[in-house]
Image (cartoon, rainbow, N blue to C red):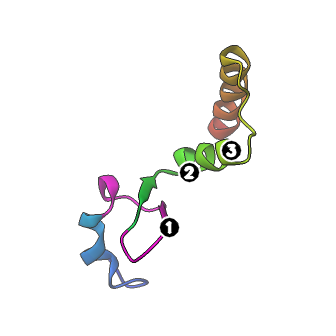
Amino acid sequence: MGGANPEWTQEKGKQPFGCLLILVEKNKGESPDFVICESGNIERCFACIGNLIPANPKKDELQEQVRNQIADV
């Protein structure tokens, strides 16, 4: 364990829920301003930034339903 990235065993406890994949946003300095984990959350974050999430809640839920179905396959 930890052969590919020996630092992971030390860093794991510092990550949200002890998970990788993480997204770290830094605006200024070394401290992160925003940290999230889980690929679906990161995907949704970028979709929001790119205005790809419908503003209409019903349309948003339909697109989320399709996204979840694709993720299941």
Sooner in the amino-acid sequence: mark 1 or mark 2? 1
Q: Which mark is residue 47?
A: 3
Position of 16 compared to 26: left or right?
Answer: left
Q: Position of residue 6 (x, y in %)?
A: 33, 85
Q: Which residues are magenta?
A: 15-31
Three-letter amino acid code at the position of disc 2: Ile
- Which residue matches tag 2? 42
- Contact between marks 3 and 1 (CB within 8 A): the answer is no
Query: Which badge, 3 or 2, comes first in the chain's sequence?
Result: 2
Q: Is residue 54 above or below residue 23?
A: above
Image coordinates of residue 59 in percent, x first then y, are 74, 19
Q: CA distance from mark 3 to mark 1?
A: 20 Å
Q: Nearer the viewer, residue 73 or 17?
A: 17
Q: Amino acid at mark 3?
A: Ala
Q: Residue at label 1?
A: 27
| Residue at (41% x, 60% y) in the render | 33
